[in-house]
Image (cartoon, rainbow, N blue to C red):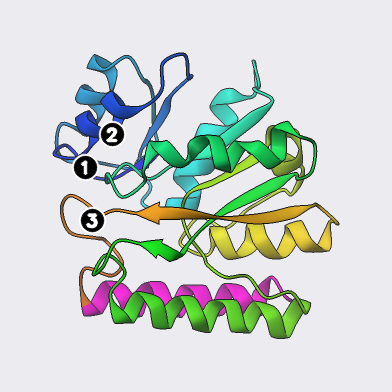
Amino acid sequence: MPVLNEEEALPLVLAELPAGLRVVVCDNGSTDQSAALARAAGAEVVAWPARGYGGAVAAGLRHLAPSPPDVVVVWDGDHSVDPADLPALLAPLQSGHADLVLGDRTRRADPGTMPPQQRWGNALATSLIAIQTGHRFADMGPFRAARYEALVGLDLVDATWGWNVEMQMKALRAGLRVVEVPVANRERIGQSKISGSVRGSLRAGARICWACWHYGR
């Protein structure tokens, strides 16, 4: 769970998680109490101060390496993910029908939770990936699950918002079985680092477009 200054949302997110999960919070240089609150809730906390979504997730995956799980779930700490969708996300992996499962928010997102710039960015990114690979994804959402060994085997290197793009393109190239399942998208707590401002949207959009070109070569 990559986290950057989510002290308001994080306690609620962690309290909603099903019992028995191993929870790793990747603190991406928070300046608030996010890390302390995660520890207090029983999560393992990995510090990765160099800002970047992909870098934070990679730090979490390395933390798991000495005792790796069969399956890893990437889950935002902003309360937008509904834990009720976890069984549906895991089902294709548990049945042996998928190596990577992506949550598709486009059909079940709560009204207003995906602003126009986010939907436009999604459409642009999925279109660029389709041009490069011939495969059309429905979404570029943050809620995803994968077999740990398959995910690590992709050798993901993007330290920023291009990480999701890199994962999806490399997964197709590697012949992994990729499935999308409909998931909800709730109103996040606090302001989004990407869609919450024009500057954030432009920066993320530029990086995602670059990633589509770079990893599609």
Which residue is drawn at the image coordinates 28% and 34% (left, top)? 13
Check disc 1: other Cα within 10 Å, few if <14, some if 14-19, many if 20+: many
Q: Is residue 90 above or below residue 17?
A: below
Quadrant containing the C terminus is bottom right
**Which residue in the structure is indicated by mark 1?**
6
Q: Secondary structure at mark 2?
A: helix
Q: Is residue 206 magenta?
A: yes
Q: Which residues are magenta?
A: 198-217
**Is 163 positioned to the left or the right of 168 in the image?**
left
Q: CA distance from mark 3 to mark 1?
A: 14 Å
User: Residue 118: horizontal and vertical position, in percent?
Assistant: 36, 74
Q: What label does residue 187 carry, if any?
A: 3
Q: Residue at x 54, y 78 (%)?
A: 125
**Secondary structure mostly seen in the magenta stretch:** helix
The residue beneath circle 2 is 13
Three-letter code, disc 2: Val
**Where is residue 16 shown, x and y percent of the image?**
30, 28
Quick one: label 3 or label 1, which is nearer the N terminus? 1
> As rendered, which of 182 and 81 lies closer to the eye?
182
Seen from the viewer's position, the closer of residues 27 and 175 is 175
